[in-house]
Amino acid sequence: NVIQIIEGVEINNFGQQGNLGRYPIHFHMCDDVSGSIISKNVVHHSNQRGFVIHGSHNVQIVDNVAFEIFGHCYFTEDGIETGNIFKHNLGAVIRMPANIIPNENDHSPAVFWITNPNNHWIENVA
């Protein structure tokens, strides 16, 4: 339960297509990380997804831009994630990856993949 801050970073050509867990920004099973902020970052030309929240709660994802992404862009992974705030984010040009992770749902990728309504989605643009 460590507060994490990622702010003002450009991430280009990250992610490993077809490999589970290999994403540009990935909060993986962090539990309650209240106070954590992902803000004012740009992820582009990602090979596998964009901003992934998995088994983590109360992260603020604010004022980010993502484009030219293979797979889902802003993504809550299992549906157990709660209290996360996605606010003022922009996503564009989302594409189906050539190598899809087995048993995953990137066949129809979305800018905002919402698996649990107990998160906050505020003034985002796709």
Image (cartoon, helix red, strand yellow):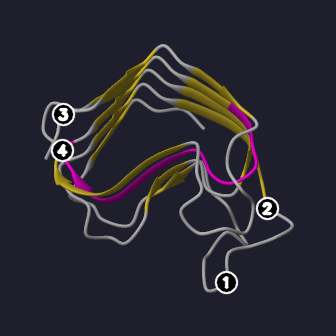
Q: Mark 3 = which residue?
A: 3
Give whichever of discs 3 and 4 has the lower sequence position. Answer: 3
| Closer mark to the observer between disc 1 and disc 2 | 1
SS for tag 2? loop
Which comes sooner in the sequence, label 3 or label 1? Answer: 3
Residue 62 sits above or below residue 59 on the image: above
Q: Looking at the image, which is closer to me, 35 or 105? A: 35
Task: Tell me the element at label 3.
Answer: loop
Mark 2 crowd level (few <14, some 14–19, many ≥20, 10 Å Cα):
some
Residue 28 placement (x, y as % from top left) = 36, 57
- Identify which residue is drawn at 17% across, 40% down: 2
Near mark 4 (Cα within 10 A), the count class, few <14, some 14-19 or many ≥20, is some
Please give the residue where the numbered disc 1 appears in the rendered image.
102
Query: Which picture quadrant has residue 97?
Result: bottom right
Judged from this view, the residue extending furthest toward the top is 8
Residue 50: quarter of image: top right
Q: Which residues are magenta?
A: 44-58
Q: CA distance from mark 1 to mark 2?
A: 14 Å
Label 3: few (<14), some or many (≥20) within 10 Å? few
Tell which tag, 3 or 1, sits nearer the viewer: 3
In the picture of the structure, the residue carrying the numbered disc 2 is 96
Q: Closer to the observer: label 1 or label 4? A: 1
Looking at this view, name the residue that lies furthest to the bottom. 103
Q: CA distance from mark 1 to mark 4?
A: 28 Å
